[in-house]
Amino acid sequence: MTKSLLGLTAVLSLFLALAGCRGERVTIVTTTSLDNSGLLEEILPHFEAEHGIRTRIVAVGTGAAIQMGRLGETDILLVHDPALEQEFMDEGFGALRQTIVYNDFLIVGPDALPAKTLADALGLIHGNLTFYSRGDDSGTHARELYLWETFGYDIDGFGGWYKETGQGMGSTMNMASTTAGYTLTDRGTYLAMRANLHIGVAYENPEDEGLHNLYSIIKVSSEIRGGDGEAARVFFDWFTSAATVNMIGEYRVDGERLFIPLEE
Amino acid sequence: MISEGLRTAFELLVSFDWEIYQIILLSLVISLSATLAAGVPGVLFGILVSIGRFKGKRLVKVLLFTSMGVPPVVMGLIVLLLAIGPLRPLDLVFTRTAMFFAQFLLVLPIIAGSIVISSEKTQVRVLETATTLGARRKHKVGLLVRETKPFIFMSLILAFSRAIAEVGAVMLVGGNIKGETRVMTTFIAMNTSMGQFGTSIAMGIILLFVAFLIHLALSRFRRDFYG
C-alpha cells in the first residue's frame, strides 16, 4: 500500500515537472468576450507555426485583465475599454498600444423592441422589462453605464427590474435567457452563444457609434513584465500586421463577420 | 496584498455599509438554515444505514460516500435545470429559495455520510447492548440518538463549513444579483474576476472571522467537543 502510494506520488510529480517545462512563450490576457468568440483559437496556430513561439491565453474581465497587466503577469493584453486602456498607458505600464478592430454592442432579449433609436429602446426597457447589467466593471459594463447616463438616466434610482449580476458576458446572457430578460452584449459573444439561447436580437444598429466596441492590443512594458520582451514584441508586430488584421476581418461565425478592421 | 486585505476588511466592517452586512447576513441565513434543515433527514438516514442489515448495504454506502463529493457547481446545475424545467411554476430561478434548496441537497449526503463513517461502530454496539438488556424499541431509538449526539454535532459542523464556503452552487442558482442573491463567496468570486484582489481578500478574512465567531460561541456550551 505504502509502496504503491509512493509510486503514484512519483509518477504525479514527474508529470507536474514535465508540464512545467517551458520554451519561448507569450502570455495573452484577454477579455471573456474575445475568448468566447473563438477567434484566437482560429488565428493563434498560424502565429505559433510561423514563429515557433507558443501562446497561452487567460480569459478574464477587462478590469482584471488590466490589473494582471499592472502586476506584470502577462506579456499582451487584448481588451476593449478605451478609457481604462489610456489610463494604463498613461501610468507607464504599457509599451505599445494599437486599436485594431471593432464590432458593435446590441441589446438581446425575448422580443424585438419596437424602437427606432437606441434612446427609444432604453426607454422601453426602463422600469418595465427585466434588464441584467454585468455590474462587474468590464468593458461592456462601462459602456452600458455610459449609455444610460448619456440618455439622462440615473442608475441609482433604478428599481428591481435592473439586476446587477457581477458575472461575465456568457453567464449574464444565460441569466437573461433563462428568465426572459434583456441585456447588453457584444456581437461576438452573442453569435458564439446564439445556438443555446432562448433570446434574440432586441435592438441593433451597427451605424450608431455609441454602440461601437473597439478592441485594442497592448504590449506590457518589459520593465513591468521582466525579461527582454522580444517574443511579446514579435507577437505585437504579427497581430498588428495587415495580413493578420485581414484574417481577423474575415473571421466568421455562422457566416457572420465578428470584427471589422478599423482601416475599412 | 494580505495586509492590505486586513485593512480593507476592517474598513468594510466599520464603514457600516448596509450592502456588506446584507451579504454577510444572507450567507449565514442560507447556509445555517440549509444545514439545520438537512440535519434531521440526514441524521436519520445516517443512523438507519449504520444499524440496518439489508441487502445492498455496501452499494448504498458506496453511493452515499460518492455523493458526499458532488461538486457544488454540478448540484447547482441540477437545481437550476429543475427550476427552469419541471419546477418552473414555482418561480425559483435566481432566488434565495433556490440557493437554500441547492445547499440543502449538497450537505444532505455529507451529514448522513459522516454519521455513518464516524459512528457506525458506536451505534451498532449501543444497539446490541440495548437489545441484550431488553430495551424496548422506543427506548432504543432515544438511546441511539443520544449516543450519536457528538457525532451529529460534528456532521453539522462539517456540513455548515461546506455550505458557507461553496461558491459554485449559489452562483449558478442565485446569480449573484446585487441586493438579492449576492453572498460572501460570490462576492469574492466577482471581485476577483474584476481584479479587485484586495476587496476579495478582505471578504475572505471576514468569512473566516465569522466562522471563528460561530465556533467560539459553540465552544462555550459544547465543552465536551472543544475541550
Image (tube, coloured by chain):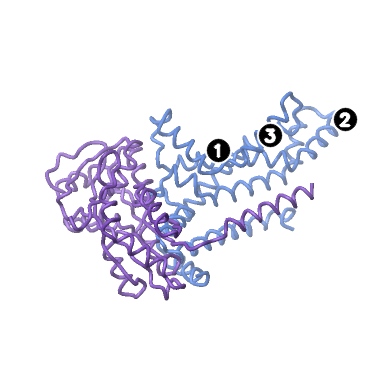
Chain colours: A purple, B blue
Q: Considering only vertical position in the picture, is B144 above or below A263?
A: above
Which circle's residue, 2 or 1, is located before the other in the chain?
1
Q: Considering only vertical position in the picture, is A206 above or below A110?
A: below
Q: Nearer the viewer, mark 2 or mark 1?
A: 1
Q: Which residue is mark 2?
A: B132
Report the front residue among B130 and B174.
Answer: B174
Q: Which element carries disc 1, helix, strand or loop?
A: helix
Q: Chain of mark 2?
A: B
Q: Chain of mark 1?
A: B
Q: Which element carries disc 2, helix, strand or loop?
A: helix
Q: Which element carries disc 3, helix, strand or loop?
A: helix
Quadrant position of residue B58:
top right
Which kind of residue does numbered mark 1 sit on?
Leu
Quote the CA–CA distance across marks 2 and 3: 31 Å
Quote the CA–CA distance across marks 1 and 3: 18 Å
Which circle's residue, 1 or 3, is located before the other in the chain?
3
One can see residue A27 in this view: yes
- In the rendered structure, find residue B105 and report the number of the disc placed on it: 1
Which kind of residue does numbered mark 3 sit on?
Val
Residue A7, image x, y percentages? 74, 50
- In the rendered structure, find residue A89 and report the number of the disc placed on it: none
Residue B105 lies left or right of residue A29; in this view the side is right
Same subunit, tags 2 and 1: yes
Residue B128, image x, y percentages? 84, 32
Q: Which residue is mark 3?
A: B62
> Are dots 1 and 3 in contact, CB under 8 Å?
no
Q: Considering only vertical position in the picture, is B112 above or below A62?
A: above
- Residue neighbourhood size for the residue with mark 3, other residues' Cα within 10 Å, grouped as few (<14), some (14–19), many (≥20): few
